[in-house]
Amino acid sequence: MDNRVRQLTTTALMAAVMCVLGPLSIPIGPVPVSLTNFAVYITMYVLDLKRGVVAYLVYMLAGLVGLPVFSGFTGGPGKLFGPTGGYIIGFLPMAAVIGLVFKKYRTSRIIAVLVMEAATWIPYLLGTAWLSVQAGMTFKAAFAAGVLPFILLDMIKIVISAFIGPVLRNRVSIFS
């Protein structure tokens, strides 16, 4: 198979993984626990910076046009631009930061965990500001609702990603 075809196929596959994992969520308040960030972490292990960001854009655009790929099997502009849209949009620069650092340090689990944790603060902060404005909450109240309940769960997702991400990457034959 041509290398370009394999790259396109792998990028599409990772976008599909996001579309499958993204809707799985547990509603615990204004912001649900979802597997979207976990899917992004894994995607950035499997793909390079450019294709990882493209895969996430495909996922986001699928949700924007109404496919039920966002948490709770929702989609459409109302979801993307609604109270939790800042988190969804924030995953894009998060993916880019992870991809930039993974270019050089992908093989170090410690650096990977630190980078994923630090990059996760991008959607945390953007999402909190967005939630605050959209829901008429103070920043502190939005942070308490949209970040504090997720820090430990997200750290667990990050650690799991650091262990299964390299395994998945090694299984994809287009990388050496």
Image: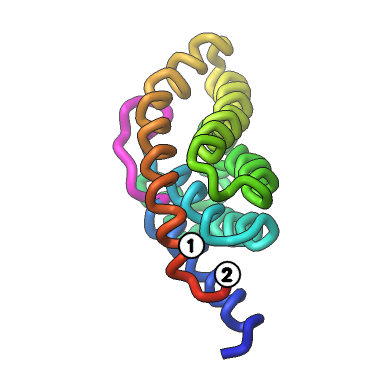
Q: Secondary structure at mark 2?
A: loop
Q: Amino acid at mark 1?
A: Arg
Query: Visible in this render: residue 134?
Result: no
Report x, y in % for residue 23. Answer: 38, 50
Asked whether disc 2 touches disc 1, contact meaning CB atoms under 8 Å apart, the reply is: yes
- What is the quadrant of the C terminus in the image? bottom right
Q: Residues within 10 Å of mark 1 (few under 14, many from 20)?
A: some
Q: Amino acid at mark 2?
A: Phe
Q: Which residues are magenta?
A: 22-33
Q: Is residue 17 above or below residue 138?
A: below
Q: How many marks?
A: 2
Q: Secondary structure at mark 1?
A: helix
Q: Nearer the viewer, residue 173 or 123?
A: 173
In the rendered structure, the answer to whether residue 168 lies left or right of residue 46 reads: left
User: What number is the disc on residue 175?
Assistant: 2
In the rendered structure, the answer to whether residue 66 lies left or right of residue 101 reads: left
Q: Is residue 149 above or below residue 27?
A: above
Q: Is residue 59 above or below residue 79?
A: below
Residue at 62% x, 88% y is: 2
Residue at 58% x, 35% y is: 115
Quadrant assignment, res 93: top right
Residue at 53% x, 52% y is: 76
The residue that label 1 is drawn on is: 169
Residue at 46% x, 55% y is: 166
Q: Residues within 10 Å of mark 2 (few under 14, many from 20)?
A: few
Report x, y in % for residue 110. Answer: 50, 35
Task: Quote the CA–CA distance across marks 2 and 1.
Answer: 8 Å
Q: Nearer the viewer, residue 38 or 110?
A: 110
Look at the image and say whether residue 106 sits in the magenta stretch. no
Counting residues from the start of the chain, the first of labels 2 and 1 encountered is 1
Q: Nearer the viewer, residue 64 or 19?
A: 19
